[in-house]
Image (cartoon, grey):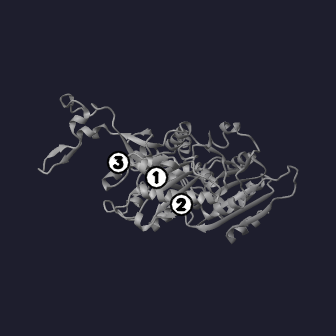
Amino acid sequence: MICALLLGREGSSGFPGKNLFPVLGRPLAAYPLMTAKAAKSIDRIYVSTDSPRLKALASEYGARIIDRPAHLATKTALGEHAYVHGYQVIRDELAKEGESIELMVLLFANAVTLTPQIIEEGVKVLRDYPHYDSAVTVSCYNMWSPLRARKIGEDGLLHPFVPFEVFGDPSKLNCDRDSQGDVWFADMGVSIVRPRCLENLHEGLLPQKWMGRKIYPLKQWGGFDVDEAWQIPMLQTWLQAHEVERFSQTRRVSWSQYYESEQTVIARLGLTEDSKVLDFSYDCGGLGLALRERFGVHEYTAVCSGKQQAQTVGILYPEARVVEGAIESPASEALPQAAFDLVIGLGATDITSPLDSLLEKAFAYAKPGGALVASFRLTDQQTVVDPTRSYQESSSGAGTDPERTPYVVMNAKKLMAALRKLNPAQISGYGYLGKPSSTAVTPYRMVCFAVLAAHKAERSDTKAGPRIELQLPDNLLKAIDHSD
C-alpha cells in the first residue's frame, strides 16, 4: 500500500499561521492534500499535526489524523523524527489489517509545489528501480551555487562559506553562475521513500536523512517550501503556471464538499467499486475523486466541454477517461449506450440547449437499473433561461474580467414533465429552499436547490408510470401534483 503522510504543526515563529494562510482562495495546506488525493497511486492520506484547524482541514480531504506528540511539535523538533513517528503509526495500523507499506509519500503542509503527475513519476521510478531509496522533487537554482555562498566572519566581513579549493583551482573560477554546472536543490515538494529509509534513518544522507542515500531527482522548476510571507506571490505564480489555482478554486474533490442534496440522492443509488460512472457536470473530475473516496468507484468517465476543461480533469484526476464535447454532441457518440450505472450532471442544466434533448441523450447512456442524476434550481413560477435576465458572474483569477454565465431556474412542473418523457421506472429527488448565490442576478429571491434522479427500468417492456419519491418544499410538490 502507498500512503501519503503530511506534516504540519500549529506554531510558526517566522511566519505565524503559514500552514493555513489563504492562497488563491484556499488554505496553503489544502494544496498538497488535494494533490495527494488526485494521485492515483496513493491509497491513503495521513496528516500528523497538533493543530485542531489543520486536523479539520485534513478531514475535509478524507485524510486520517495522527496526533503529533508534543515533543515532536516544538520549534526545535526535527521533521525527520515526526516522519518516523507517523510512519510507525501507519505501519502498525496497516499490520492489524494484514497490509504492509510499499512506499511512503512524504509531504509538508507548507510545501505545495507538486503535481499528481510528478508523484506518479516518482512511484514508477521506484517500482522500476528497486535499488533506489527514494525519488524527490528538485529545482535548479544556479544563482545559489555554493561558489556564491558567503558567511559573515568574526571581523564582520564576508568570507566564502565553502573554501574555493573545494571547487578546484581558484584561479580558474569566475562569476558566471553556470560555471559549476546545474545546481539542484531538494525543494521539499514531495519525497517518495521506501520504508527502509524511515526504519534506518541514521543511514540516510544529510540533511534530509529520510531520503536514504540513493536518491532519484524528480526535476521541476521553481519549487520551494514557504517560510516567509514574501514567498506567497511567487507561490501564486507557480500555482497559476501549473493551472493548479484554476481547478483547486473551482473544483470540489472530496465527498464532504458536496451539498446535502447531492449526497442524499447519490448515496441512495447503491454505488460500489464496480459501478461505472459517466459525468457531464460543469466541474467534472472532482466528483470522480469524491466517488472513489466514498464508494470505491474507479471506472469514471468525464465528458468535457473543451480542451481546457479536459486538461484540468487530467491534472485533477489523471486516471479518468476523458471525452471532449457536450453530452449531446457527436464526440460523445463513441461512448457505449446503456453502459453506465450512473450518468450525472451537476450544474450541467445551466447550458442553454433544449432540456428535453439533453435529458434524452444523457438517459440513453444509463444501463437498465442505472440512473440519470442532475441538479436543478426549481421554482413554482416561470422558467428563466434567458442569460440576460438570470445570470451569474465569476472570475477565473486576479486581474481578469468577470465571466457571465446562465443561472437557469426551472419550473418544477415542466421539469417533471420532461423527466416523465424518459419513461423511467422511478423519479426520486431531494431539495431545499435557499437564496440564490450572492453573485447571481435573477428574478427570484428564493429557489429550490434540488437533485433529481430518473431510474431506468430493469426491463424495457415496463408500461407502468414512474414511481415518485420526492423530498421537496410543499409549494413545489403541489405544483408537481397538478401536472398529473
- Mark 2 vs mark 1, CA separation in Å: 16 Å
Name the secondary structure under disc 3: helix
**Residue sitting nearer the eye, 350 or 256:** 256
Residue occupying image coordinates x 44% and y 59%: 82
The residue where tag 3 is placed is: 234
**Residue sitting nearer the eye, 248 or 158:** 158
**Residue sitting nearer the eye, 370 or 121:** 121
Q: Where is residue 284 shown, x and y percent of the image?
A: 59, 49
Neighbour tally class for label 1: few under 14, some 14-19, many 20 plus, Cα within 10 Å: many
The residue where tag 2 is placed is: 89
Badge nearest the viewer, 2 or 1: 2
- Mark 3 vs mark 2, CA separation in Å: 35 Å
**Upstream in sequence: badge 1 or badge 3:** 1
Residue 345 visible to an observer of this rendering: yes
**Residue type at numbered disc 2:** Val
Q: Where is residue 296 shown, x and y percent of the image?
A: 66, 53
The residue where tag 1 is placed is: 107
Badge nearest the viewer, 1 or 3: 1
Q: Where is residue 379 shown, x and y percent of the image?
A: 64, 63
**Upstream in sequence: badge 3 or badge 2:** 2
**Upstream in sequence: badge 2 or badge 1:** 2
